[in-house]
Amino acid sequence: MSQPAIDRAFERRLAALLNGGAQQLLQGGRKGVEKESLRVLPTGELAGSPHPLALGSALTNEHITTDYSEALIELVTPAFTHSWELLQYLLDLHQFVYRHLGDELLWATSMPCAIRRDADIPLAQFGSSHVGRMKTVYRNGLGLRYGRMMQAISGVHFNYSFALPFWEAYAAVRASHRHDAAFTSACYFDLLRNYRRYGWVVLYLFGVSPVVCESFLRGRDVVLPELSHGTAYEPYATSLRMSDVGYRNRNQAGLAVSVNSLEEYIRDLSRAISTPHPAYEALGVEVNGEYRQLNANILQIENEYYSFIRPKRVARSGERPTKALQRAGVEYVEVRALDVSAFDPVGVNQNKLRFLEAFMALCLLKDSAPIGDSEQARLDANHVTVARRGREPGLTLWRDGRDVPMQAWARELLDSMTGICEILDRGDAARPYTQALATQAAKIAQPALTPSARLLEELKGGESFFDLALRMSREHKAYFLDLYPPNEERLKEFASEAQESLRAQRAIETADRGTFEEYLQRYFA
């Protein structure tokens, strides 16, 4: 392989941060996690019970909600500056949830099992308010468009923002006269483009869904080899969840959303949520007085757009995501490519979080030219290739018009993170970021160390994926219920938040005015 061109801009920016005394500003980044898990019965079948009342209202509880299904719990941490604080909070959330699940379990893997048909997956319910009803109708539309089984996949989302003081120092590094919302947004879009270029490495390092239950494939035109009875797999897969077997949806294959600028991103998403799609028109919107979907457009709302990473801003009440971005620019990014780790009771670990934080800095600091449409298609293909074949010996990926060995490219990316990890380690003798980087570098040298390879190794004895996931789910439940001493103060806090959220939902329902149709018209106006 010929030597890659040296990224002078990246080296210059990193040196300027190191020499300008601004390195500690990189340490203040804020990180949060959203972790999804299916509620299942002790037999491993999907729970048909409603979201437990003791966990509060899925509509208004900020930290415990549901995603697509009533049985798909989503745990949301606040943003923390230290990953250990984040993990402690996530652990406490799990402990609280498990105290109110009775004999149910949280499924330990991303890929669902033991679901016979779409109709067995109940839609999340958010009460009788207009906003609650809108959320359920939206989910019904997703099920009609893509199938409910795809929506029952769980994941971990990593939310990250650089510290506010960092932007002032970075503006000086970039010789920008301003460090306002426009500058910050433009820099976050640099990051987004580079994540599209390099994010496949996240699938390789952390993907842990090389297998699926055969029930997941039922009724689909996907054929995978059988590993054992009831278990299908790809021998070298890292994350079937993030491949065309899982989320990479053919319905959205023709949807191009540019990340070359905030303006282009908003333009493309706005077009998609206002352009009718003939196949969705054929499904009908309101049929016999019942809403099947919010509208018949390419996307019902912005959140329907599946991507590995999204620019985000906390929206005001009733405000659409694109309007929030338009109003005040990008506040943080949401990395959506992480599988739930069966090897970690909370689904994620500190090494992973530290690596991702350093990787966000790499994507920000590296040179980031605009991406053309044809290049975007090739970059998407790299992600799918690594998702399905990432551990294949001699695997090559497309880079700047030619095929290059994936392993060499991955090594190069991790090598260039060394200086970033040194900055993030300043003042900590244990050098946790450098350690996290070394752990990931070992996986590139030895694919057998990747979580996807570890999972396949666990299944070598003939245990089915279903049985392994059920066993792990039981072990995780025992782990949380046996933890001593529990953080009683925080558990009380969660209990009072749950009660408060139920009151907040009732207040929203009481305050509703007008018809549901009028509410939708106002929302989309």
Image (spheres, helix red, strand yellow):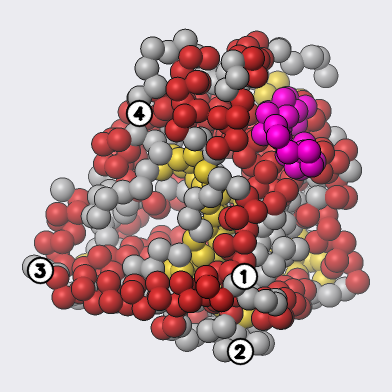
Q: Tell me the CA gap for discs 3 and 1.
A: 39 Å
Rendering coords of residue 341 (x, y %): 69, 60
| Residue 148 can be seen, yes or no | no
* Mark before the other along the chain sequence, 3 or 2: 2
Extreme-left residue of the structure: 514
* Mark before the other along the chain sequence, 1 or 4: 1
Give the main secondary structure, helix, strand or loop, of the magenta stretch.
helix
Task: Answer with the quarter of the image where residue 282 lies.
Answer: bottom left
Label 1: which secondary element? loop
Q: Tell me the CA gap for discs 1 and 2.
A: 19 Å
- Residue pictured at 55% horizontal, 37% vertical: 28
Residue numbers of the magenta segment: 413-437
The circle on residue 112 is: 1
Label 3: which secondary element? loop
Q: Nearer the viewer, residue 49 or 226?
A: 49
Rendering coords of residue 370 (x, y %): 49, 20
Residue wearing tag 2 = 103
Determine contact: label 4, label 3, CB under 8 Å: no
* Mark before the other along the chain sequence, 4 or 3: 4
- Residue pictured at 35% horizontal, 24% vertical: 180
Label 4: which secondary element? helix
Question: Label 1 amino acid?
Answer: Pro
Please rate how many residues cluster around mark 3, counting C-alpha atoms within 10 Å: few if below 14, some from 14 to 19, many from 20: few
Q: Tell me the CA gap for discs 4 and 2.
A: 48 Å
The circle on residue 181 is: 4
